[in-house]
Amino acid sequence: MPIIEIKDRKIHYLISPNSLERNRKTLLFVHGAGGNRNHWLNQFDGLKNEFNVIVAELPGHGASSPRGANRVEHYAADMAIFIDTLSPSPPVVVGHSMGGAICQTLALNFPNKLSGLVLIGTGCRLKVLPSILNGLLSNFEETVSMINRYAFSKYTDEDIIQEGNSEMVKTPPSVLHGDFLACDRFNLCDKISNISCPTLILCGEDDQLTPVKYSRYLLEKISNATLKTFPKAGHMVMLEMPEKITQAIREFVHTLPQPQ
């Protein structure tokens, strides 16, 4: 994987096989708490030949630098520099959960850096149970297992759930705790109506971590937004319904103007 150095951090990323072309629309995928590039492999494979596709690994995750952050705005500032450095035009930014919080922050603080927004399983506020924050420091693997039990629909294959657990447990405890602390501190509900770019909101109907009401609130507050929900899918809807999520993103991106 290629690397971009931002300040004292290295960010690894996946990129479309034909490099980045100025006359193609660009997609930037941002994973959630404890995630990595593997959360987006289905979407990357499905879209990489049609658009410029970039999958970033946040600091502290995957093959990126080992130190993460404990505030969403810190990750968003890194992604703003990442976009300036790499993207040939303002991308459509796609964020899941904490990644969705990062993308909302980008849309508010750096509106000229993006052309559209896809928010998956997220909200304008992401409070975290104290038992999760404490458990990530005192009983890491058991707490990760509990998080993943809540993260998937009861209809999801056990193999997919176990794979999700295996990916999250790779994240160092201090980084995962920082991610969930960043989520707990995140609250843009009094500002979210200032987002003006075209926005697609996607949510699994069985999402227990960011229930559908969070997505409906985003739909109510963001003027240029649409919402699609997916039965028999939970918080990790892009893993549970990969083809449907990929197609929803594809259809949305095709509604946007070509980059100048």
Image (tube, grey):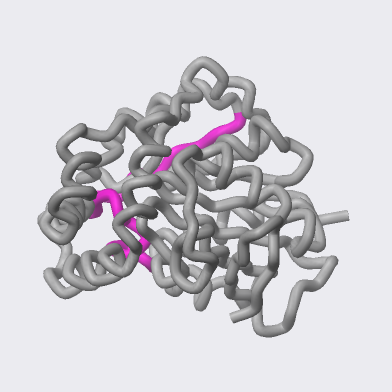
Query: Which corner quadrant holds the C terminus?
Result: bottom right
Q: Check if residue 229 falls in the magenta segment.
A: yes
Tally of marks? 0
Name the spot of residue 101 as percent of width and height, x first. Answer: 48, 39
In the rendered image, the quadrant that contains the N terminus is bottom right
Q: Is residue 99 in view from this perspective?
A: yes
Please state the horizontal and vertical placement of residue 82, each as a whole percent of the image.
Answer: 70, 57
Residue in the picture at 46% in, 57% down: 31
The image quarter containing residue 49 is bottom right
Task: Magenta stretch: give its range.
Answer: 224-242
- In front here: 139 or 212? 139
Q: Residue furthest top?
A: 190
Q: Horizontal placement of 189 versus 21: left or right? A: left
Q: Is residue 235 above or below residue 223?
A: below
Front position in the image: 8 or 216:
8
User: Residue visible at 75% across and 64% down?
Assistant: 86
Residue at 37% over, 66% down: 242
Decide: is 25 above or below 193: below
Viewer-nearest residue: 26 or 80: 80
Q: Is residue 146 magenta?
A: no
Q: Position of residue 143 (x, y in %)?
A: 15, 52
Residue 170, quarter of the rendered image: bottom left
